[in-house]
Amino acid sequence: MAKTKPGRKDLDSYTIKGTNKVVRVGDCVLMRPAESEKPPYVARVEKIEADHRNNVRVRVRWYYRPEESIGGRRLFHGAKELFLSDHYDVQSAHTIEGKCVVHSFKNYTKLENVGAEDYFCRFEYKAATGAFTPDRVAVYCKCEMPYNPDDLMVQCEGCKDWFHPSCMGMTIEQAKKLDHFLCSECDSENDASRSINGFPASSVSEPKAEPKRRKR
């Protein structure tokens, strides 16, 4: 942590102007952008301090939205996805508009309801080079794309992989009505097995297809 300069003092917390919301070190906040038409910036508070005139400033570590990164937004990026950058800054505490929560990717996918203050992060991002950590993530479906939690996917009972309805020639409405699902590859193998055995495969203990929840 950076040392406090002479004439300044560290603060344990800061109350957002016009609200009763208290910000502490480690909290994630929404900060007012210079251009009013842009969405608020998201940052993690690293330090809170006041000068001799009681002007409060915060040292923050910025989160970047996908469209703010060098590579831009891609299909698998969620609407509420952020990248934790290595870009630090010092801002007036008056630019803090509110608080938010940046979840881990795993915890975000478990949310029953996604609120306006909910975001998620699965990558760290180097602002100067555009490099990501980790640089590899699991891919799904025959399109071999990383999981976007905004998209509904269905799980194959055979290979257990997840698939986008559109990649399997289905609409979202059709996918939501599925009780069971086999991908085209497993379905072909299943047909071949039935032909060899001369009778249908047993349906005992078949798991039910489980559509991934659609985030809004």
Image (cartoon, grey):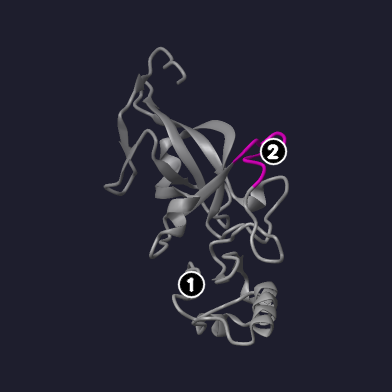
Residue 77 visible in the snapshot: yes
Towards the viewer: 205 or 160: 205
**Three-letter residue code for mark 1:** Glu
Q: Of circles 1 and 2, which is in front?
A: 1
- Per the rendered image, the range of residues in magenta is 124-136
Horizontal arrangement in the rendering, residue 18 relative to residue 208 (left or right): left
Which amino acid, by three-letter code, is at mark 2?
Ala
What residue is drawn where x is 42% and y is 43%? 28
Image check: 79 left or right of 8? right
- The answer to which image quadrant residue 70 occupies is top right
- Image x and y of residue 122, in percent: 55, 47
Q: Tell me the chief SS of the magenta region.
A: loop
Count of labels in the image:
2
Task: Determine whether 184 is above or below 108 in the image.
Answer: below
Residue 204 in percent (x, y) is at 45, 79
User: Are the two marked residues, 1 and 2, in contact with CB atoms closer than 8 angstroms?
Assistant: no
Give the residue drawn at x 49%, y 41%. 43
Instruction: Kindly identify which residue carries mark 1.
Output: 210
- Where is residue 154? Give x, y as percent: 55, 72
**What residue is disc 2 on?**
131
